[in-house]
Image: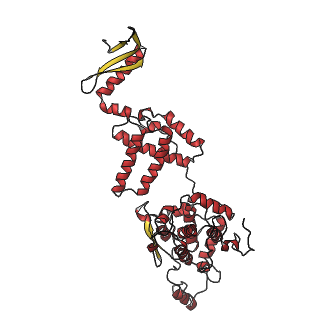
Amino acid sequence: MSDHLFRRKLRNGKLSKTLYCWAKDETGKIVKRSTGCTDRAAAKLYLANLERRFADPVAAAAQSTTLEATLALLIADREALVRAGKRSADTVAYYKKKCAQLRAHFGDDFVLARLTAQEVDKYIDARRAVGTAEATIAKELGALRAALRIAKRRGLWAGDHRVILPLDFSPEYTPGTRWLPEPELRLLLGTLTEDRAARVAYSVATSANFGEADKAQRNDVAGRLVHIRGTKTAKRLRDVPLVFPWQEELVAYALEHGKGEGENLFAPWPNIRRDIHAACERVEIAPCSTNDFRRTTAHWLRRDGMPKEIAALVFGHKGTKMLDEVYAVPDGKEALDWALRWFSNDRGKPVGKEGGRKGGNGRTRRTDRQQKGREKRPLGVPGPGIEPGTRGFSSHVHGSGWWPQPSKRPDQLGRAAERHDAGGKPVGKKRTA
């Protein structure tokens, strides 16, 4: 036993083939273990590892830390940040969702010391095999990276996440371009049941996302301001002004048809993505998502001349970057429409080309008719300045009869939707199955 290795005597009097070892733990107590090896060289490696673990308890803990425990530390860390006011409660829900995927693949008993680049690659391949988007996999790897950094800082893991995780796994983000013209929104509202049509109308009018619409209450609407209970960032908790008539019409529509209990404006909607896609298929328009409703808001606001700095406040953004790159990006045809609205006066001529008398300094003075026009301009409609003047949005004053009544049955079109095609033109009554 000079090398701390020995064989045990069996009941039949023979020595075991398996080698055993002994060593002193951190308290000085002698501990005997089976090496599970029959080869002496392999048994010596097991013994050496055992002695290192006894000599360094922190390293020993790192050898037994599970992925489940590491992910639990990540969730606890994010919850602490929420309590400190540095993160939104939605952040915790986000990480719980990503951690659930990691646990489902690796298992709760997976020891962190076994995590290698090969294991991560297997995870990526498995997620791709079930059709998971690259952006979603990148988010899950981000959650794993955050958990490993916490474990390393606390001495529960001795590895290096920069070696284990892929360096170039950051798929380029391609923002969506789908938004709904008014005829398509009418068709969609007409085929949805009351509460769901009301929620869609509310989202388009106010830019509220799915979670914000979930929290909407009737007393959030106060005149021409709607309080949005956003939690993602500090600016998401905001008051949205109802500047244009279509906003007021859609909010009134939501108040009329919302079926939430108590103060809640809307009832829960368990599977909104599936139901919206089914509704789009029924009225034969391209599929859309809840984020496309926010994109619709942005396009309509910018179409009617709202400065993007104000539109950014409506969306709860710090600046205009998201509008410029994601939410309000016009295609060529739409850009032409915006330009004609922004830079044309009542007679269809470009702004600034209308005749006026020149003063002594050579600058064009406003005619009496132009001056009267400025005085009669209603409040809330900005005049020409850095942003072009809002022209033509009054054509979108529809009145309460324009927006269709919701469907009483989810498998049939609403009455108003039956009487109009995708272009908004009246048609004969459609037959329903």
Q: Is residue 129 above or below residue 223?
A: above
Instruction: Please provide percent x and percent y for residue 325.
Output: 54, 60
29 up-or-down from 61: above or below: above
**Residue 177 appears in the figure:** no
- Judge from the rendering whether residue 273 lies leftward or rightward of residue 8; answer left or right: right
Which quadrant does the C terminus fall into? bottom right
Q: Is residue 389 above or below residue 114?
A: below
The percent position of residue 267, horizontal first and vertical second, equals: 51, 65
Q: Where is residue 430 in the image (x, y as percent from the top left)?
A: 73, 70
Asked which quadrant contains residue 332, the reply is: bottom right
Q: In this view, does 271 lie to the left or right of 113?
A: right
Pick whichever, 217 or 112, lies toward us: 217
Q: In which quarter of the image is residue 50?
A: top left
What is the quadrant of residue 19 in the picture?
top left
Q: Which residue is drawn at 56% across and 39% down?
A: 126
409, 358: nearer the viewer: 409
Colouring convention used in this rendered image of the protein = secondary structure
Most distant residue in the bottom direction: 368
- Quadrant the N terminus occupies: top left
Direction left: furthest residue: 28
User: Visible in this render: residue 134?
Assistant: yes
- For the point 61% across and 81% down, the residue is 345
Among all residues in the image, which is located at the extreme top? 13
- 92 to the left or right of 300: left
Residue nearest the observer in this picture, 6 or 16? 16
Could you say where residue 195 lies in the image, as x and y percent from the top left? 55, 68
Q: How many labels does the image show?
A: 0
Identify the residue at image location x=38%, y=21%.
46
